[in-house]
Amino acid sequence: MTLVLQGHDRHADRILDVVRNGLQDPGNEVVTRSWMRCLNEYQLHPEHPREPAIISSAAMQSRFERQADVIECARYEMTTLYQQLGDAESAVVLTDTDGAIVHMVSSPEFAAESAPLGLRVGAVWSEREAGTNGMGTCLASASPVSIRREDHFFSQFTGLTCSAVPVFDPSGEIAAVLDVTSRSSLMQQHLLVLLGMTARMIENRLIDRRFSNAHPLHFHSRPEFVYTLHEGKLAVDGDGRVLAANRSALFQLGLQSMDEVRSRRIEDLFQTSLEDMLQRSSSSSFHPVVTYRTNAALRFFAVARRPASDAAPLRALSTPAAGGGVSASSLAGRSAAARAARPAPAGATFKDVRLAAHLETARRVITRQTPVLLRGETGSGKEVFARAVHDGSPHAHGNFVAVNCASLPETLIESELFGYRAGAFTGAQRTGRRGKILQADGGTLFLDEIADMPLELQARLLRVLDERQVTPLGTEETHPVDFQLISASHGHLPDLVREGRFREDLYYRLAGIELTLPPLRERSDKRELIHGLLASESGGDGVLSPEAERLLLEYAWPGNIRQLRHVLRSAAALADGKPIGREHLPSLFADGGPAVPRPQAALPPAGPAVLPAEAVADGGEAPEPAPLPKLNPIQANERQVLLQMLEQHRWNVSNVAKALDVSRNTLYRKLHKLHIEISHP
Ligand SMILES: Nc1ncnc2c1ncn2[C@@H]1O[C@H](COP(=O)(O)OP(=O)(O)OP(=O)(O)O)[C@@H](O)[C@H]1O
């Protein structure tokens, strides 16, 4: 490793000079004060570097035990942060309050290179031992710090840059330090923000964990911030007394310390009782209810719940019913059936070099519970890819549950995702319904077109991802859930974040790793894909003439694999057993020409295969084409027009939406209503 000692005399001189002659750069006060402590208090000298102090593994055991819940709460967040950084020459590190490293996430290469410097579990990074450094100086100053290369007291660390933030426990004491140590000194400001967010997530988890017998109370002065990282969070006992609060709660209540809030009653803080809040929260399906701050007459929006430890077993929600309720045991049975019956799409191939590498990466990171965000043009195979990741993952025995956020009516997304109790709202099924999130428990949840999720639901989803538990509408029961998350978008989410249409914190949550799938025209396995799909669309006896093959290989495929599948299906039907030639691929290759004709023989009367939405969403058995439900003459006409437009635009929904001047959301809803299936052949 090139973390060099070179120039250490000059480095030492600079430190001694600054300490003796006072501050030259007021911006560096934290560093200068640390240098002073190192020299005067700890009697360290920059010219006499020390060997890293390492605690024996026997002694570390008791530290692990002491810090067990903090480490447990931090483990997942640290892995997520590491994936987000995408910096192979960095480590995310957690120390206890003595500066001893208790957990670390990094690449094996970086771990091996930096271990001799003491960057490993068991090493102590307090200022007393290691001089000025991210972890030690954060502990000493009890505040976030960035220690860049030459800020380090000892020259052996000047190849590194560290950013560190304190993690507080529910009593307001520092419980740990979270640090990123990297060779790169870029983006420190950005890094401190990310670290701060991660620390808050750990702190919130710690409250849930240590106070699982208490009533959680979430609040904020703006309703859209309830259930987010910015919310105030209190743990309240059965008598309505506050046991713990997060930092945001103190800030919003205008209090300085935990002592000022501990043992205060809910009535003192919000002019209402805990019972009243619980009742109103429950009857509002856990949408935030208004409440007031006593003295400052401030208005808050709040949700109170029963303790997580009271969570009812899954059975409470699961009535076996034709209408969608599914019992835990029947779910297990269905899960097995789904696995047996769920084939990879016929002709599926991932041999393109980029795609194969992405598949490998996604399969690797998903085992570490890192969420995967897929980008790719419409029809490029994001769902098929997600399914392949699921099938090769440790959760493959569970369900693969796909939810298309754009195709669900806004009013239904919430109940589809979270489920509901019988009679939770007008129109609810008599038996209640398990939401998609619960269906994905033990398996994989695939959120397609995530950019179309309404903002209020983004907050609820974020909460589920943070807390790993779900509360169906109309109930107070929380159900722990364990699922792998893959989401997809063909838009650029950071742009939407910038425009305020997508929550930044949710984006970071989803994008543990972000992979862009190549469009069909760029895939190196195009030939194989064409032949595989043709075999499946023609029942195995389709043959391409050399000219047709060349045309297919050269075409730009704006609708990607979905379009290719449709074209091959039409061509196979038109050729009727003969080799497919140019004449069977009509106007597709005349630029801007009319649509590819769809042969009646291969399809139901009014268009492509029509599947009931339910049949395709859960990754269940491969569905049979269903008979077209009865439509009135106006609907039938509308349906015909839409099918024609889809054909003209090669099944590119965005382009059709543009041509009709409606949002994609509206168009998806319309398609759904008219039983036009888009995402599958
Ligand atoms: N690797 C593949 N091999 C064979 N067929 C594939 C492959 N990937 C996708 N397909 C086919 O392409 C079509 C579109 O795939 P998919 O629904 O996964 O795309 P998508 O990117 O999720 O589309 P959208 O952006 O519209 O949601 C489906 O018919 C699917 O079976």
Image (cartoon, rainbow, N blue to C red):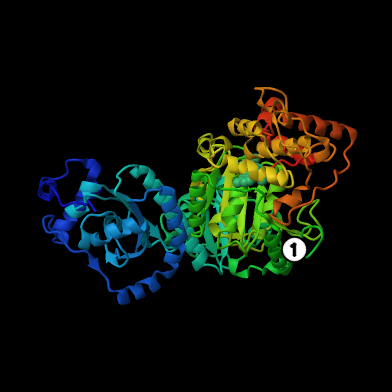
Could you tell whether 148 is left or right of 6 in the image? right
Q: Residue at x 69, y 55 (%)?
A: 619
Q: Quadrant of residue 639?
A: top right
Q: Amino acid at mark 1?
A: Val
Q: Would residue 162 be visible to someone looking at this image?
A: yes
Horizontally, residue 367 falls left or right of residue 345, namely: left
Question: In terms of secondary structure, where does tag 1 sit?
Answer: loop
23 to 129, vertically: above or below: above
Classify residue 332 by image quadrant. Answer: bottom right
- Quadrant of the image where one finds ligand 1: top right
User: Which residue is at a point 59% across and 53% down the rendered structure image?
Assistant: 388
Residue 64 location, x and y as percent? 38, 71
Q: Which residue is mark 1?
A: 326
Q: Quadrant of the C terminus?
A: top right
The image position of residue 26, as x and y in percent, is 22, 41
Left/right placement of residue 544 relative to residue 116 reads right
How many numbered discs sit on the rendered protein?
1
Mark 1 residue's CB less than 8 Å from ligand 1: no
Q: Position of residue 535 (x, y in %)?
A: 69, 45
Residue 341 occupies quadrant = bottom right
Q: Is residue 681 visible?
A: no
